[in-house]
Image (cartoon, rainbow, N blue to C red):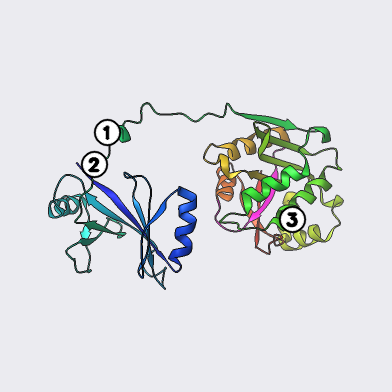
Amino acid sequence: MTSRIGDIVIKAQDPDRLSRFWCAALGYTVSALDETGVAISGASNAPTILFERSDDTLAEGTLHFDLCPTDRSQSEELDRLVSLGAKPTEVVPSGGWHVLADPEGNKFCLMSKRIPAEPEDFHDLGPAQTVTDADIEYAVLKTTGQMPETEEVRDLYAAAATEPPLNETLQTAQVFADLFRIALKRNDVVAVSARQQGRLVAFAYGHPWRWKEQNDEWANDLKTRLGGEASTIDETIALFLLARDPSVQRRGLGQRVLKEWLDAAEHESVWLQTTDIDTPAQRLYRSVGFKAIGHGPKAPNNAPSLVMLKS
C-alpha cells in the first residue's frame, strides 16, 4: 500500500483571511483554530488544509504535505519512503512526525497517525477521457459585421490578463477594447474568434502594417526603440491581440486560434508585441516560430514589452 496526504500545510501571514477565502472556494469549514493558525476540512476522505501562522512565508517555501500511513506503522512507512529516495533532514523528529525531503529537497512530514486507504473507486477512473472542442465554434472574420462587440473584447481581455502573471487592470482591458474599435474603421482587419455557447472565449485580430501609414506617437516610439530592426516589420501583418478566457484553459484554444489566424492572414511575415516576461503566451509564440527582434513601447500597465517577428 501507500501513504496518503492527510494535511496540506500552508505558511500564511494572515491565516484567518486565507482560511475564509479557501472555505468559500472549496466548500470547507473551519475545524480547528488556535494561536498557531487555522485548520479547515472538507469531505472525510479529503486532506485537511492547515494555515500555519508565519511572519516569513518565503524562508523555506509556503507549502508542504503531511503524509499519513494507511496500512503500517510510522517507522515501517519511514523505511519505505527512504528506500524510494526520501532523505531525513536536520529537523529533530518528534513523537508525532518526521521531517523528510523528496529527491529534489522539497520537505514534507511523515505523521504517526494512520488514516484509511483511498476507496477503490478513487483509483478506478475508467477509460481516459479525451477533451474535445466540439462545444467550441471557430470563425474567421474579415468584415466589420462579423466582428465581436468591443465590450466582448474588453471582457475577454480582462478575464485573460487581470490574473497572474500579467496582473493587468480593467483600465488596460478598456485600452485594448478602444484600440480594437479604432481598428474596425479599416477594411483589412483579419480576426479569428472562438465561442462557447455564444460566449467569446478566445479571439485574435490584426491587420497589415506599413510604416508610411504610421504617424502617431506610439508608432514613432516603436520605430525609435527598434532602431535598425524597424525595417523588418514594414509591409507585414501585425497581430494586435490574442486572448483566451482562463475558464477554457488547457484545451489548446489559444494555439488553435493563433494558427487559424496565421493561416487567414495569408502573409509570410507577422509581428506582435507582448509583455517581456516568461508567460504561456510568449512560449506559444516561440513554439510557432516567432523570434524576439527588440523592445517596443511600454504596455499600458507600464510593463516592458518585447517585439517578436515570424518570417
Separation of marks 3 and 1 at Cα, in angstroms: 62 Å
The percent coordinates of residue 285 (x first, y second) are 60, 46
Residue range of the region highlighted in magenta in the rendering:
266-279
Separation of marks 3 and 2 at Cα, in angstroms: 63 Å
Do we see residue 239 in this rendering?
Answer: no
Label annotation for residue 120 = 1
Q: Quadrant location of residue 145?
A: top right
Label annotation for residue 230 = 3
Above or below, 109 against 198 in this view is: below
Asked if residue 51 lies left or right of residue 223, the reply is left
Is residue 243 magenta-colored? Answer: no
The percent coordinates of residue 193 (x first, y second) are 69, 35
Q: Quadrant location of residue 223?
A: bottom right
The residue that label 2 is drawn on is: 117
Give the amino acid at mark 3.
Answer: Ala
Q: What residue lies at 54% left-to-right and 55% top-to-bottom? A: 278
Which of marks 2 and 3 precedes in the sequence? 2
Quarter of the image for the N terminus: give it: top left
Q: Are marks 3 and 2 in contact (CB under 8 Å)?
A: no
Separation of marks 1 and 2 at Cα, in angstroms: 9 Å
Give the amino acid at mark 1.
Answer: Glu
The percent coordinates of residue 84 (x first, y second) are 20, 49
Q: Residues within 10 Å of mark 3 (few under 14, many from 20)?
A: some
Asked if residue 82 lies left or right of residue 283, the reply is left
The percent coordinates of residue 26 (x first, y second) are 45, 48
Is residue 274 magenta-colored? Answer: yes
